[in-house]
Image (spheres, helix red, strand yellow):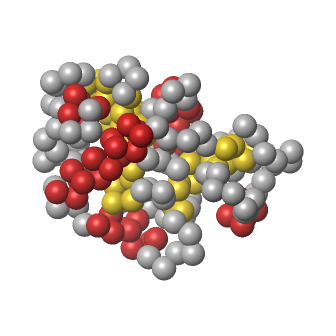
Amino acid sequence: MSVAAKPMTLEEYLNYDDGTDTRYELVNGELIAMPPESRLNIQIAVFLLTQLSNLGIPDNQLAIKTQIAVSGATVTVREPDLIVLSEEAAIALEGAKQSLITHDMPPPLVVVEVVSPQQEDRDYRYKRTEYAGRRIPEYWIVDPIAQKVTVLEWVNGLYEEQVYQGDQQVRSPQLPTLNLTAATMLNAG
């Protein structure tokens, strides 16, 4: 659902407050209300956050509700379900007024999106292109609807895709000690 008639600037987006709890992404300058997350999507994101923390990733490098500015026809800001920040990106966010990774900051190491119903194009198509534009080393698409986990690795200017299902061990080039199967991720434990 679009909210604004004219394209918003990043500054306008960052200062926008409609007095509700509605979460928005900025897509090509257009304010888009994000659909409410399902309980399963939230459980998956929290489960993954806990698992990544257990791997020893410092708390300041794990982020939920952190946004990232990406390339679009005009200004686009996405809010992934979970982000693993590089040490440099975590330092760049320290003291920031808002939890937003801007174009002048280093990209995160890993971005995780949990697919919501009727949002498949957003995660598989649009965000894939946008995250590639930021050269994010790894992008996970955790899809409880299709029962698969897709890991996209940035290699020589393109994402290479590996799909995992069932009891297949999910391999993460950025997180080589990850020890989870697709089923474990999709069922949040």
Quarter location, residue 168 = top left
- Residue 13 versus residue 135 in the image, above or below: below
- Residue 18 versus residue 162 in the image, above or below: below
Total of numbered circles in the picture? 0
User: At x 29% / y 53%, what residue is drawn?
Assistant: 49
Q: Residue 161's x, y, as percent?
A: 34, 27
Q: Which residue occupies the foreground of this view, 64 or 87?
A: 64
Query: Which quadrant does the C terminus fall into?
Result: top left
In this picture, residue 32 sits left or right of residue 81:
right
User: At x 17% / y 38%, what residue is drawn?
Assistant: 180
User: At x 48% / y 59%, what residue is drawn?
Assistant: 66
In this picture, residue 159 sits left or right of residue 48:
right
Query: Which quadrant does the N terminus fall into?
Result: top right
Q: Is residue 170 visible?
A: no
In this picture, residue 48 sits left or right of residue 113:
left
User: At x 22% / y 28%, what residue is drawn?
Assistant: 183
Q: Residue 100's x, y, as percent?
A: 54, 62
The residue furthest right is 5
